Image (tube, rainbow, N blue to C red):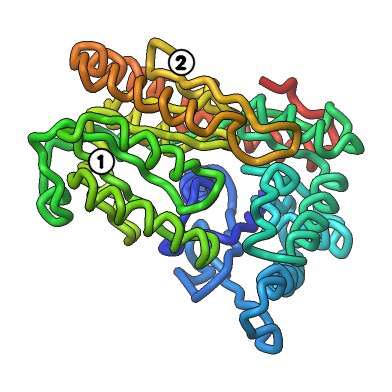
Amino acid sequence: MKVAILSREYPPDVYGGAGVHVEYLSRELAHHAAVQVHCWGLERSGPSHNPAVFAYRSWERLAGSAPYLDALRAVSINLAMAAGVADADVVHSHTWYTNFGGHVAKMIHGIPHVATVHSLEPLRPWKREQLAGGYELSSFCEQTGLEAADAVVAVSSAVRDDILDCYPAIAPDRVTVIHNGIDHVEWHPDPGIDALDRHGVDADRPTVIFVGRITRQKGIRHLLDAVRLLDPDVQVVLRAGSPDTPEIGQEIAGMIEDLQEERGSVVWIEEMLERKEMIQLLTHADVFCCPSIYEPLGLVNLEAMACETPVVATAVGGIPEVVTDGRTGLLVPFEPAGPGMAGPKDPDGLARDLAATLTRVLDDPALGGQLGIDGRRRVVEHFSWSAIAHRVLDLYERVVRGEGLPEFG
């Protein structure tokens, strides 16, 4: 079988969970099928490899700084991708950045289209800050691609519910759940401290770590509010970069600088890190915090759990399908401001709850240690890429044969 995977991200240009997903899934699928990855950016390894990699850039005439141009550039890449997958048996798109390409490929080549949903545009209204009118175009690309896809994959049961709520034209029997995975052999506790020394992290201090992009979705401002309520002796490590807009970048930078002046012990790492460095930082943290206000699954929670780091996370989206409250981590209740509204109803209350739950883990090393051990066990038993790839291959074979999807779950 020839499989064409469409993705904005692919190594070395990976900035989020969807890119990590595509990297590992394509690698695992390549053991069983001829896999092509069609991605954005500069050329990677050539077409003789498996997976073969083909890279695309947007049309030169779409150069410029207007926010809506980002969406137009995405569409131009989608059209080029669709032209490049004529010999595939199935095309598999990831996120709105390539859903439209999968849809066009299906129309012009008659190729079955599978689309994986890592997030949904209607549930990310803050993206209007980033794309302006381009947000309407990104939403159109997503809706068009998903509604016409032969199969839609949700990365969690919560995302499946969101898909059916946002796009009622999609028949429920065309939506199945296949979770994200993680390479638990690669992601494991590492006692080394090279990364800590390089970034000025004190290995002997109690430490909270956050890893994520600077975006409304990841809830970093609520964690920063919570940090003010933590013991001043607690060290906070923020691997936070790639802001959605200059405005939110400046806002968060200001909050971090204020905290550094008020309490110290706040280490901000803006650069993307090598995986080995990230593993060391997670291993030596006493607790990982995921304060997201929207999270389809939360792959970064799996990465922390694989490193035996206890997790404190908001109970949103697919996070409760990863973090078992009281066993592999602790969940903080989250009440949204209202239907279709971004953010918590009570931001101050959320900050207090985050601070109290982080403090509970920091003050009880035995609890943190057991959460970490049980978290890694859950990763190994339920989230291996080998099992996930076999489920995806089964899905490909079903859509190629025109059969029904497996039951979700």
Quadrant containing the C terminus in the rendered view: top right
Image x and y of residue 15, in percent? 46, 56
Q: Nearer the viewer, residue 87 or 395?
A: 395
Q: Check disc 1 and report the residue beneath it.
A: 236
Q: Is residue 259 left or right of residue 344?
A: left
The residues tagged by marks 2 and 1 sit, at their Cα atoms, a distance apart of 24 Å
Give the vertical position of 53 relative to 359 (above or below): below
Q: Secondary structure at mark 1?
A: strand
* Residue at 70% over, 49% down: 125
**Which callout, 2 or 1, points to the residue nearer the camera?**
1
Q: Check disc 2 and report the residue beneath it.
A: 324
Q: Secondary structure at mark 2?
A: loop
Q: Are marks 2 and 1 in contact (CB under 8 Å)?
A: no
Give the vertical position of 93 relative to 66 (above or below): above
Q: Specify few, some or many for label 1: CA neighbours under 10 Å numbering under 14, 14-19, or 20 or more.
A: many
Q: Is residue 31 visible?
A: no
* Residue at 38% over, 17% down: 328
Image x and y of residue 115, in percent? 72, 46
Q: Specify few, some or many for label 2: CA neighbours under 10 Å numbering under 14, 14-19, or 20 or more.
A: some
